Image: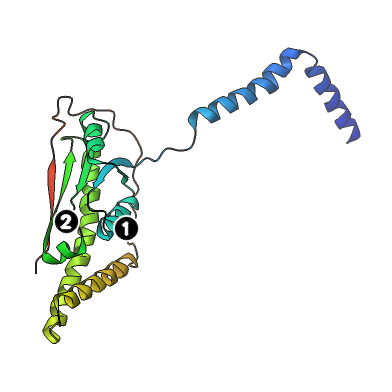
Amino acid sequence: MSKILAIAWKDALLRFTSPAEWLFFLILPIFFTVVLGGGTGAPRDPRVRLVVVDQANSPLSAELLSTLGSSEAVRPEVLPLGKAEGEFSRRRVSAVLVIPAELDLQHLAQGKIELELRQRPNNMNALIAYRAVTAAINGLSSAADIATASVAEAGRIKPFESDAARQAYFEASLQEAQAQMSAAPRRLTVVRGSTKDQIEYDPQANSSAGQLITWSLSR
């Protein structure tokens, strides 16, 4: 073994006698590793960017933002209305979700809230954002339907003493429904590709195009 090590050491000394050998075998590999590693940086979030204007700043809007944040399809970013419209008009974002000031538990119990989704037509990222927002709203709407049915049944068994008691019962039922739905096991796993869409379908699209998503609750 000692002879093998001696031969290897001798060959290494002969190999690196020239400064060019040090350059090609040691310095350049380290240099390119540092340059490429610093240039690529951390892995980029492959989800579609969704700008959200939260005019409510309520627990219900925070719940909606949390649901969107846990989505595997979109990456919500909260901006003021003016900046969001500027991003949309400059075509830096495919969809903008405007949450109205009425998105709170009191208006939710009354029956109907409208959210505005502005999206670029014929755009794949806008379609992905639309489906993600619809799924999030449907989840919250289902919990609200459960809470509304619970309030109706509780009122049938024993009338509420006041509107405040009815509202408190609705809020507690809504929280319980959301907790039960969040604890439900996932039965579907979605694998989504991260390939960027190379085709621009709407080069002359009107940047002010939008779509209304209506959240309706029956009493």
User: Residue 94: in sight, yes or no?
Assistant: no
Q: Quadrant of the N terminus?
A: top right
Along the line of sight, the residue nearer the viewer: 60 or 145: 60
In the rendered image, which residue does mark 2 sit on? 102
- Tell me the kind of residue under disc 2: Glu
Q: Is tag 2's residue or tag 1's residue first in the polypeptide sequence?
A: 2
- Which SS class for mark 2? loop
Q: Is residue 12 above or below residue 184?
A: above
Residue 140, percent from left and from top:
23, 61
Q: Secondary structure at mark 1?
A: loop
Task: Write down the quadrant of residue 215 in the picture.
Answer: bottom left
**Residue 176 appears left or right of 119:** right
Q: Is residue 27 above or below residue 116?
A: above
Q: Position of residue 56 (x, y in %)?
A: 22, 53
> Where is residue 142 drawn, in percent x and y?
20, 64
- Of 58 and 92, nearer the camera is 58
